[in-house]
Image (cartoon, rainbow, N blue to C red):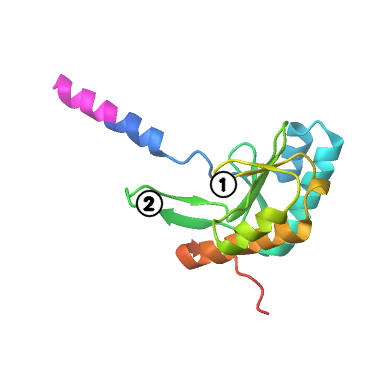
Amino acid sequence: MRKWHEKANLHQRLYAMAQNKTTPTTQSVAAFLEAFVDNEAKKADARALIEHMEAWTGETAKMWGPSIIGFGSYHYVYASGHAGDAPVVAFSPRKAALTLYVYSETEKSKAALAQLGKFKMSKACIYVKRLADIDLQLLRLLCEESIRYISEHHACSCRLPQA
């Protein structure tokens, strides 16, 4: 009997670890900005990003987890079977930099990134100190490329405007 409980507890712990922590919340985006961002310039940049990303995605800003502002959503399923939902594009006004979650590895994205401006990058996150450091038209192109890529590979809420 004890071994069964140990296995059940292990299963519960593994299930809890596999749950996506970045899920939509009901927290107010405006309240988050007021409480989380103590730098007025970063707050202004965050508000500008919200305005731009809402226009580019056609989606309203929503909180995802405790500190990510996301636009739209898509459902993913990995080969391992792990599945979840994520924002199509998003950002977080972190203390060190604005963290932009807008990159899909396409040829257009690579070309835009090469001319984007002053930033740092990890695997899929772009870190910007100030919006003035980057070209907003190229940021828009990166967002549109992400929407296009995600729409082609996943069930996605965002749709690009028809040209």
Instruction: Check the picture and name the quadrant holding the C terminus.
Output: bottom right
Q: Residue at x 57, y 52 (%)?
A: 87
Quadrant in the picture for the N terminus? top left
Q: Under tag 2, what secondary structure?
A: loop
Of label 2 and label 1, which has the lower sequence position? 2
Image x and y of residue 136, in percent: 77, 57
Left or right, 160 with respect to 18, comes to right
Task: Residue under label 2, please give it.
Answer: 78
Q: On the image, numbered disc 1 is attached to which residue?
A: 124
Q: Is residue 100 left or right of residue 78?
A: right
Residue 159 in which image quadrant:
bottom right
Q: Residue at x 75, y 45 (%)?
A: 118
Magenta segment: does it hold 6?
yes
Picture coordinates of residue 9, whole percent (x, y):
28, 26
Give the magenta-colored segment's residue range: 1-10
Between 135 and 6, the residue placed more toward the observer is: 135
